[in-house]
């Protein structure tokens, strides 16, 4: 009978110097400890891998009260962002509440902001009007509009300009408020004799009375520029109501001494006043308002011409009256 040691010695090749090593008790203890450490490390790695899934599931399961609070915060942020672009009222600002000095300066700040907003419309524009350009070759790219701010009219938002449509040329008045426009046009108009009456001055007077009634002011002898401040949304594109008075350059429609008048409204496409779309009433060319576009090509008004007060109302033919002698 042979033991394991003799069997092992028999299987070893001849001349082999390899000897079996004995495992001491200390080495066995170290091996067991190392095995335990490996199992612990594997358990920790498994736990860390499953942690994000557990965390994400906790985030998905929000409490109802958390959702309500989150929704309320979003609404407050949305309201705050909407208020930032609009014209800031003194009650909505912290500055006027700081004392009398800021109260006085706040009025100057608001006036400056309004003026800067109106100044975005000031400049010279190239006009594209297919109704005119297609019908009258040679006028392509030649149509122009210049707009300037009337000194002291920041409150009423009235602007004055010169319109050149190739066929018609003359002054145009714009305002951010239609009622202010009607009062201004009547105040700035004149008749050959103060006591005389004609169809155009009667029309302007009726419009002015209705406008003053809508604004809550009575008949006054002061200029239209003392009207109440018109509302101006600083966060929105400018919308201007206008009226023009033009003479017939080519004498195609009117007699030389007559002046054609009608409405001209526009809406800017952007806050910078770089372009606008408009509708102008030219009944001798179309039964419907004629569409046109304007593109700013200059920062200042470069077209000079007659002022609104240049024309006597007795010679003005408004709207469908253009063909009357």
Image: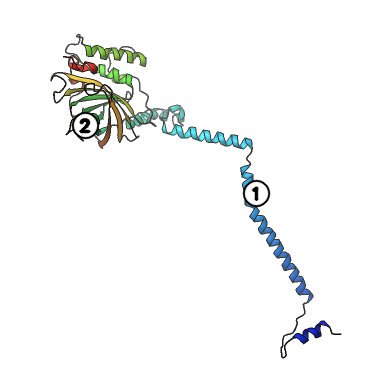
Nearest the viewer among 244 and 219 is 244
**Image location of residue 65, percent across then percent down:** 63, 35
**Above-or-below relation of 5 to 137:** below
Looking at the image, which residue is at 57% across and 37% down?
Answer: 70
For residue 92, say whether it is visible: yes
Q: How far apart are marks 2 and 1 (CA)?
A: 71 Å
Quadrant that contains the C terminus: top left
| Residue at the disc numbered 2 | 134
Left or right, 104 with reference to 73? left
**Image location of residue 304, percent across then percent down:** 18, 29
Q: Nearer the viewer, mark 2 or mark 1?
A: 2
**Above-or-below relation of 41 to 163:** below
Q: Residue 54 carries which label?
A: 1
Left or right, 233 with reference to 182? right
- Kindly state the secondary structure of the residue where label 2 is placed: helix
Q: Residue 130 carries which label?
A: none
For residue 298, say whether it is visible: no
**Image location of residue 183, percent across then percent down:** 29, 17
Label 2 CA crowd tier, 10 Å (few <14, some 14–19, many 20+)? few
Nearest the viewer among 102 and 120 is 120
Looking at the image, which residue is at 66% across and 59% down?
Answer: 45
Left or right, 43 with reference to 304? right
Looking at the image, which residue is at 67% across and 55% down?
Answer: 47
Residue that lies at the very extreme toward the right in this rendered image:
1
Q: How is the image coloured?
A: rainbow
Sequence-wise, the earlier of marks 2 and 1 is 1
**Image location of residue 228, percent across then percent down:** 35, 20
């Amino acid at each position: 009978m042979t033991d394991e040691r003799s069997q092992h010695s028999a299987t070893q090749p001849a001349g082999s110097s390899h000897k079996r090593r004995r495992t001491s008790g200390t080495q066995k203890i170290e091996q067991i400890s190392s095995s335990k450490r490996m199992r612990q490390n594997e358990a920790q790695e498994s736990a860390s891998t499953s942690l994000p899934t557990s965390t994400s599931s906790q985030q998905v399961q929000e409490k109802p009260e958390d959702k309500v609070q989150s929704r309320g915060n979003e609404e407050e942020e949305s309201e705050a962002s909407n208020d930032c672009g609009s014209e800031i009222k003194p009650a909505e600002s912290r500055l006027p509440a700081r004392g009398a000095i800021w109260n006085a300066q706040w009025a100057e700040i608001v006036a400056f902001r309004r003026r800067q907003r109106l100044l975005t419309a000031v400049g010279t524009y190239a006009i594209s009007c297919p109704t005119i350009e297609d019908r009258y070759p040679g006028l392509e790219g030649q149509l122009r509009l210049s707009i300037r701010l009337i000194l002291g009219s920041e409150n009423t938002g009235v602007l004055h300009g010169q319109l050149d449509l190739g066929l018609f040329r003359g002054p145009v008045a714009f305002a951010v408020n239609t009622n202010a426009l009607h009062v201004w046009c009547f105040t700035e108009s004149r008749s050959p004799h103060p006591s005389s009456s004609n169809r155009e001055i009667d029309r302007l007077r009726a419009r002015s009375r209705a406008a003053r009634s809508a604004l809550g002011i009575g008949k006054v002898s002061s200029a239209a520029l003392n009207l109440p401040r018109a509302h101006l949304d600083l966060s929105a594109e400018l919308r201007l109501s206008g009226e023009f008075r033009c003479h017939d350059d080519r004498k195609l429609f009117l007699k030389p001494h007559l002046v054609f008048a009608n409405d001209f409204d526009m809406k800017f496409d952007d806050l910078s006043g770089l372009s606008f779309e408009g509708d102008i009433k030219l009944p001798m060319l179309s039964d419907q308002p004629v569409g046109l576009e304007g593109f700013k090509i200059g920062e200042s008004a470069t077209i000079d011409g007659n002022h609104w007060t240049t024309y006597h109302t007795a010679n003005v033919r408004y709207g469908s009256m253009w063909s009357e002698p």
